Image (cartoon, rainbow, N blue to C red):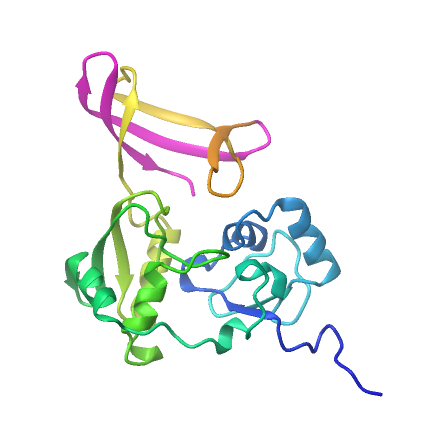
Amino acid sequence: MSGETGRDRPDWWLHEVPETEDGTRIDRYLRRLVTGLTQGPVEKMLRTGLIRLDGAKAKPATRLEAGQTLRLPPHLRDGGVKDAPATQKQAPKATPQIRKQFDSMHLAEGDGWLAINKPPGLAVQGGSGTSRHVDGMLQALAEGDEDRMRLVHRIDKDTSGVLLLARDRVAARHLTRAFQQQDMEKTYLALVAGAPPETLEMRGALLKRGGAGGEMMAVDPEGQPSHSSLRLIEPAGVRMALVALQPRTG
């Protein structure tokens, strides 16, 4: 009597590591990819081989490389949907609404790159429970895989701002490396309570807290080292101020 083994089952979630995650720790990426997944279960599934990288077991601190394949149990994908492996799903269709929204976000372009204005509420990448995102729009608008624009960095779903896209694989490699090596600077504008000084260097250990959809970074001695620079742009009395923030780590 023959039957499938767990390793051969056809409904595994197969996920290709995007260029934006080149060099990212596998445990951190998995926690972002799957809503609500915490460190303990991640480590257990990696240790037992339930989650594999290019067919092999991986340690939590393993650094990902763009193009590698993650194999995850099907219950982690889309709340347990088992219709087909992710790699076999049809790409989203380029509807007039998608084309209109993407065109409306266009800011500037150059040789090998395109800049768009990502609105708040729009995710950059898909994940468990996320069906509307920039990466899906790029898939829909592409004429073929080689013509597809690619992500080279991320902005949080609820954050608005400039998102840089690569027009091809070569540009994606150069731009991703530039972000990793901090050859490019990121600046965030924020309204803060109180009256901050004109400049401030903020150092500490940050840890993500809160459940799915309500995550916040908090100072915690068990967190990861963090360094950001603050510059005062315009105070609003003593109760509020507009500041520019530049992350120096992460």
Residue placed at 23% from the left, 64% from the top? 113
Q: State the image coordinates of residue 192 (x, y, percent, origin top left).
A: 29, 24
**Up/down of 13 relative to 105, above or below:** below
- In the rendered view, does 46 fall on the left or right side of 179? right
Residue 8, x across and y down, in percent: 70, 78
Whether residue 40 is situated above or below residue 8 in the rendered picture: above
Q: Which residues, given as a range, are shown in magenta?
A: 221-250
Residue at image point 36% right, 55% down: 124
Position of residue 28 relative to residue 136, above or below, is: above
Examine the rendered structure and indicate whether residue 221 appears above or below residue 237.
Answer: below
Based on the picture, tell me whether residue 157 belongs to the magenta stretch. no
| Magenta segment, prevailing SS (helix, strand or loop) | strand
Q: Position of residue 18 (x, y in %)?
A: 44, 64
Q: Give the residue furthest to the bottom.
A: 1
Quarter in which the C terminus is drawn: top left
Q: Name the residue located 33 percent from the left edge and 79 percent from the top edge.
A: 146
Closer-to-camera residue (133/56): 133
Residue drawn 55% across the image and 62% down it: 77
How many numbered marks have been drawn onto this rendered protein structure?
0
Task: Tell whether 224 sits left or right of 38.
Answer: left
The location of residue 153, given as percent across then percent down, is: 35, 54
Residue at the far right: name it.
Answer: 1
Q: Is residue 80 in view? A: yes
Q: Is residue 112 visible?
A: no
Residue 243 in the magenta stretch? The answer is: yes
Determine which quarter of the picture holds residue 174: bottom left
Q: Between 101 and 187, which is closer to the camera in this rendering? A: 101
